[in-house]
Image: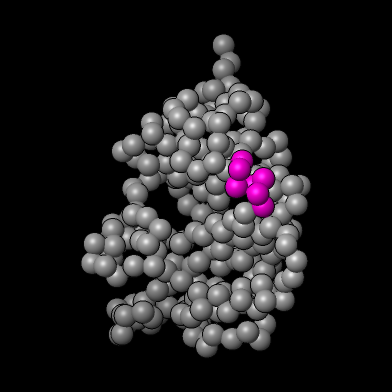
Amino acid sequence: MYNSMDEVPVSLHASIDTGDGEFDMNTLISNNAHILFIVLDSLRYDIALQEQTAGNTPNLNHYGQWTKCEAAGNFTWPSHHAMFSGFMPKPIDDTVNQTMLFFPKDIGLGRKGPKNAFAFDDATWIKSLENKGYQTICIGGVSFFNNRSGMGKVFPSMFKESYWHPRFACTVKESMDNQIHYIQKIMAERAGSQPVMMYINIDTIHYPNHFYVEGAALAIPLRLMPPRYAISTPASTDY
């Protein structure tokens, strides 16, 4: 007999039934709190933990410690479809004590989720936030967000506004600096009290990343290096 719950990861069953959640998303959203969603594309847990232990990431760790998680997808494309639909990465060792921030109704989990989760009916919680008055903004990084191909338009189309520039690409050493400068520019031009939900795909650690280590590119045979393998452009607000 068909059971819609069979389509949902077992770990999510437990997350729905255990507790109200650490964050009351409904109160935050009803109070028009700004929401910033950042993905550090390709960041490995072991490296993140190593830098945390060494004290090299104080700004990030000011907000919490790294947690070893598993994503619902195994690379950028399926992982983002999952996250934008409410299925965030879940801790491997402590899933039972985690609850959902965003709860998609009528997809096999029932209509009533954790008390503090934001329940939504739209294809993504991003669209539901837009329907509640949020200005949703996407700052792209990797090519899945470049708005230059059919596939590269899928994720950006989920947002009211989306931005990408070749200077944001992972082949650019200063890509994150360029993204931050651009964000400062567009936010400085924004007036009013409309709440903002912003997603940033930071791809500065996505391959190719040899240019962060002096001489590392020499380890790659020249015959295997594609044209313009790495581009280095200064941070700029002229886009």
Q: Position of residue 76 (x, y in %)?
A: 51, 54
Q: Is residue 30 magenta?
A: yes
Tell me the quadrant of the picture where the N terminus can be found: top right
Where is residue 82, by image quadrant? top right
Quadrant containing the C terminus in the rendered view: bottom right
Residue 86 at least partly seen:
no
| Drawn side of residue 141 relative to residue 187, left or right | left
Q: Which residues are magenta?
A: 26-32
Q: Is residue 136 left or right of residue 86?
A: right
Residue 17, position in %: x, y? 47, 25
Report the front residue among 233 and 27. 27
**Residue 6 visible in the displayed image:** yes
194 relative to 219, above or below: above
Depth check: 97 or 203 in front?
97
> Closest to the observer: 3 or 13?
13
Residue 65 lies within the magenta run: no
Q: Position of residue 66 (x, y in %)?
A: 34, 54
Q: Position of residue 201 (x, y in %)?
A: 54, 63
Q: Nearer the viewer, residue 127 or 216?
A: 127
Residue at the location (75% across, 52% down)? 133
Q: Is residue 152 left or right of residue 56?
A: right
Residue, x 63% and y 84% (percent of image)? Answer: 237
Main secondary structure along the magenta-highlighted residues: helix
